[in-house]
Image: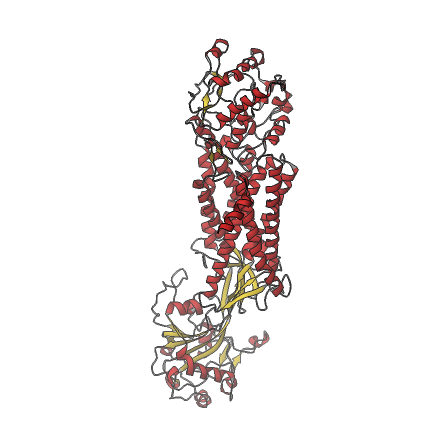
Amino acid sequence: MNIFNRLWRKYMGASTGWHQAAKVNCILLVALSIVLSSISIPIATKSQGILKTVYIFDGSCSTAGIPLINTFLHLLINVTSTLVLASSNFFMQVLNAPSREELDAAHNQGTWMDVGVYSIRNVFKVSAFKRLCWFGLMITSIPIHLFFNSTVFSTEYRRPDYTLTIATEEFLNGGSYFLPGASLFTNDGGTWAASYWQYGYGEFDYGEYGTIFYLKDYTANNSDISAYVSMAAQYGNTWNKLSFSECQEEFGLYGTVCNGLSQHSDVILVTDSTEGWVREDMWGLTEDQARFWDTYVPAMDPNHLFFYAPCTMTPRNEGLYKGLSCYDTCYNALGGNYIRDDYGYLPAVTEHWPSGYPFFVGRALSIVNGTNQTIASHLVSGLRVESNNLSVQYCLARPIQDSCHIGVSPVLLLCVLLCLISKTTIAILVTRVVDKRKQTPLITLGDCIVSFIENADLRSTNYATTSITSSGPLFFLSGPQPWPGIQLRRVTSVPRSVLVTSSLLFATAVSLCVYFLSGLISPGRTFQGSFLASSDNYTIDYIGVETFLGNVLVANSSQVLLSLCYLAFNNLFTYFCVAIEWEVFSKNALPLRVTDPKGQQISTYRLQLPYRYSLPLMVLSASLHWLVANTIYVILTEGGYIESGIRDDNLPDGVTAILGYSAKSLFVLTIIATITVTIPLILSFRRFSPSIVVVGTNSFLISLACRVSPLVPQHHNFYANMSTYGNSSELEVVEHSLPTSNRPSSDESSDLLGTAASVQQPPINYNQKQAEHEKELNLRQKISRSKLRWGVLPMQPEWFERHDYQLLGFGAETDQITVPVKGRRYQ
């Protein structure tokens, strides 16, 4: 522990302020890079190619192991990505924050920079080194948003085929049975009308009763059918016994929607018949038909097997807004024509089995009764009505020997690793270079106030303290001006360009949600499927992308739009918080919040938003990202049920990828997004105090407001010369002296401060005694390091003998700072 402490102290050295946080973030990024490298390299070497996905875990789909491991790994991914992006965000804020030298350069060029917020305008006004590093961090964040969550994936298993057996309980206990079963379903003995042959039909189409075989296939020695039925009779009692709702959900009983089989492969419907079915009681056969069947199914012996057939579930894509439907070849054999309500929906599902359903319906019933004019069977006839109803007691389902997997995409993992290493390199470079250049970034509003108090911007000496106004252009007035006493709304603290950009992003995101949701809403229709990512939900059959990586890009592209919206949303809150942080200085004397505190200044646990805002915003962001991930996603499935997806050679054998989306998740996402975007709108209508200028994040307006109090006797000599700057000849609107094309606007960089650059500055004697300069600097430092309040500065009595106005600025806690009065003149 002592060794660790010594190493830590040696590494941190005398670092203060943002340098300490920067070094901690560098350690974090280096550690994450090492951990991810140790994971990525073995996986990459294990794969048969960098594009080929690799399985890292295998297990049964029916247990909780694979889902838990998948959830845990994605939790680790989300934690890691959050740490990486948070560290990257820290350095982007540092790089985006201007130094005092950069502020002075911008003011000399007649423009301004933002302080305390993310600002695109700052990116193009800071040094080339900071600009390149900022863009590097931004670009390397995009693959993390797009790919990191998809580097690890799990497969699900769904098979389409199963066998259906309908029998009595005695069938499972050694009772007699005769193939093809009491239903006498075979593909033999058809008589067809000439028109039926004309269209090339040559076999029975009973209509959704599965695959029906010829009689010889049932009765041949050692036939596969005979062997399977014998196995079912012998081992069926060992299969899983399912309740009605479980059996209905998985096998689509009574007309419910099928969706492939994930847990069981075969099913036996056990009826309530105890004596079995007797052929003579069930059928009114002709003499020829009776003699034919006597060889296979005795007339008077009980038959405990009613029906057997292989069945197949086939998904069908019905379009973007209808998703996958499922066609079951045994739909009617499973009671698909069970009685429904007036709207075609099944009665409420319970655990209790319904009383029964008619087995022979539609085409099948007309064929066996000889009433079909197109096709009939000359092997059966005279089905008795009471024999057509099947009442099922329970079902037995054969468990699937399945295997689900968790896999990794090496190419996505290496892409994320390269981005992480790049971020780490940039972070270390920024920490060393920015520190060596001795150009301290003014990250917080307090940093900027300290800078302007300790080293006044002389370009602002003759200008009135000015607010941002909702009218648009900023007019910088020379000399004292009447105090307007207007309560501006918070929206005025946000540049118009930021408002427009944010509004467009929010409108685009919400409009897309509403557009896709509107296609899913129709009268009397409910959203199908699951709230979470699942193949039970809607799928997008074809989008023109033929690779797994392409589908990942499509599915995660919405995450990029969400990230942009979050940054815009976060930035609006930051503008409001900076404005509020400025406003409180008109109410109480408070210490400045800075990154490197001295005196009574306080250190900042944050760079921008306080925790009471940042933590809820982070939770909101994580929730929305999770919702989007469950709204549109890539499904990887095995078992052969879904065949319409993408079979990429880089995916494991037998795995199909398809895009899916959840209507339920989209509905919730739309509601939350709509409510969320209204929050800044509501907050923007709150008003500021009328006792302070609203400067927003404008560096030049902040410099105008950062005068200090001359009341303290030591200050008097320094401020005595200010009287020479208040001559009446200079009380004019400087904006009028500029050409119309050069007049400033509120949020465009062109000529915003051209007025300041064009005004003849008062002569400054840089040859004053060094002692006087140091004394002045020490006095200003003492003020900046004390508790401050903004308002009307207390003046010496001599001031009022020569002036009819007062000065506005910051005063120490001991100064008697008062509130400006509407109509009085101040500078």
Name the residue nearer the viewer: 402 or 316.
Answer: 402
Name the quadrant containing residue 634: bottom right
Residue that lies at the very extreme toward the top in this rendered image: 801
Q: Is residue 278 left or right of residue 160?
A: left
Q: Is residue 622 left or right of residue 759?
A: left
The colour scheme used to paint the residues is secondary structure
Residue that lies at the very extreme toward the right in this rendered image: 128
Name the residue nearer the viewer: 309 or 247.
Answer: 247
Name the quadrant containing residue 184: bottom left
Q: Position of residue 308 (x, y in %)?
A: 46, 79
Name the residue nearer the viewer: 475 or 712.
Answer: 712
Above or below: residue 351 compared with residue 191: above
Is residue 543 visible to the viewer in this orientation of the structure?
no
Name the residue nearer the viewer: 641 or 205.
Answer: 641
Disc tally is 0
Q: Position of residue 549 (x, y in %)?
A: 60, 58
Q: Position of residue 153 (x, y in %)?
A: 53, 61
Above or below: residue 746 compared with residue 197: above
Q: Is residue 151 left or right of residue 302?
A: right
Above or below: residue 399 compared with residue 24: below
Is residue 623 visible to the viewer in this orientation of the structure?
yes
Above or below: residue 731 compared with residue 228: above
Q: Position of residue 743 (x, y in %)?
A: 61, 24
